[in-house]
Image (spheres, rainbow, N blue to C red):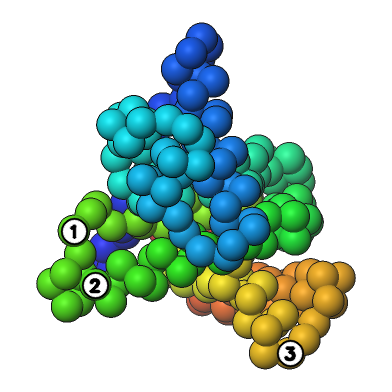
Amino acid sequence: MQPIRIKPTEAPPLPSSGVRASTFKLLLDTAMDLIQRDGHIPSIAEVAVRSNVSRATAYRYFPSRSALITSVVDASLGPVRSVPPGTDAGDARERVHAMFKATFPRFLQFEPQLRAALQLALEQWALQRAGLLEEEPYRRGHRVGILSTALAPLKPDLQPAVRDRLHRALSVLYGIEAYTILKDMWGMGEKEIERTVLWMADALIDASVREGKAQAAPRRANGRPNGR
């Protein structure tokens, strides 16, 4: 049975211009600064007060902390939130390396904001489990699409089960979670974290390719096309 993929939370639409755009930016910048300075996820009311904007106005832009933190993550990760440069050319290993190398500097620059997103997801999980969650839950998962693009060259060479397992395994590495474990538990610096994560990614890719070749050998021997 295939696991159900959870649809990630989408950020509120960014107004294109005018007062709405400037108010949106003011509220978002204030939230980013509060997280950077105080290390906690502010409420919408707190962001409104610090921005000198009415609560009603703030809630029209960000109806929940989930909406707010999704916009914070969008702003933190910038262009790598969609398709990082270099992940749509070359073989799968080159694409994966380009993806990680484009993203890790953003982890360093916006570490408090990205930790806050992880914090909110864990907090809401506990509240939802206890039946106390009173806002829409924040769902992560945009990395799934990014990884799909990076791994596209392997599609002809790997059976779907192998490819899906690799996809899921890399999703564990490609995120703030692996970064915080290696930094908090092992005291690693940024470059060492990057080298370690890339080494793990290479190991997963190598293992999947070996398995793909092993599965393809009997099919070739029986005259059956690869991948069918």
Residue at image location 29% in from the left, 40% down from the top: 63
Q: Which residue was labeled with disc 1? A: 134
Where is residue 172 shown, x and y percent of the image?
54, 72
Question: For the residues carrying marks 1 and 3, which lies nearer the camera in this image?
Answer: 1
In-image side of 189 versus 149 (left or right): right
Q: Quadrant of the N terminus?
A: bottom left
Where is residue 224 shown, x and y percent of the image?
46, 62
Along the polypeptide, which appears first: circle 2 or circle 3?
A: 2
| Kind of element beneath mark 2 | helix
Which of the 4 quarters of the picture holds residue 62?
top left
Q: CA distance from mark 2 to mark 3?
A: 30 Å
Residue at image location 18% in from the left, 58% down from the top: 134
| Kind of element beneath mark 1 | loop
Residue 160 higher or lower than 72, as above or below:
below
Which of the 4 quarters of the picture holds residue 130?
bottom left
Closer-to-camera residue (154/63): 63
Q: Which residue was labeled with disc 3? A: 186
Residue density around tag 3, few if under 14, some if 14–19, many if 20 or more, within 10 Å: few
Closer-to-camera residue (47/224): 47
Q: Amino acid at mark 2?
A: Leu
The residue furthest right is 191
In-image side of 99 versus 171 (left or right): right
Question: Residues at badges 2 and 1 in contact (C-beta under 8 Å)?
Answer: yes
Q: Which residue was labeled with disc 2? A: 127
Question: Residues at badges 2 and 3 in contact (C-beta under 8 Å)?
Answer: no
Closer-to-camera residue (180/30): 30
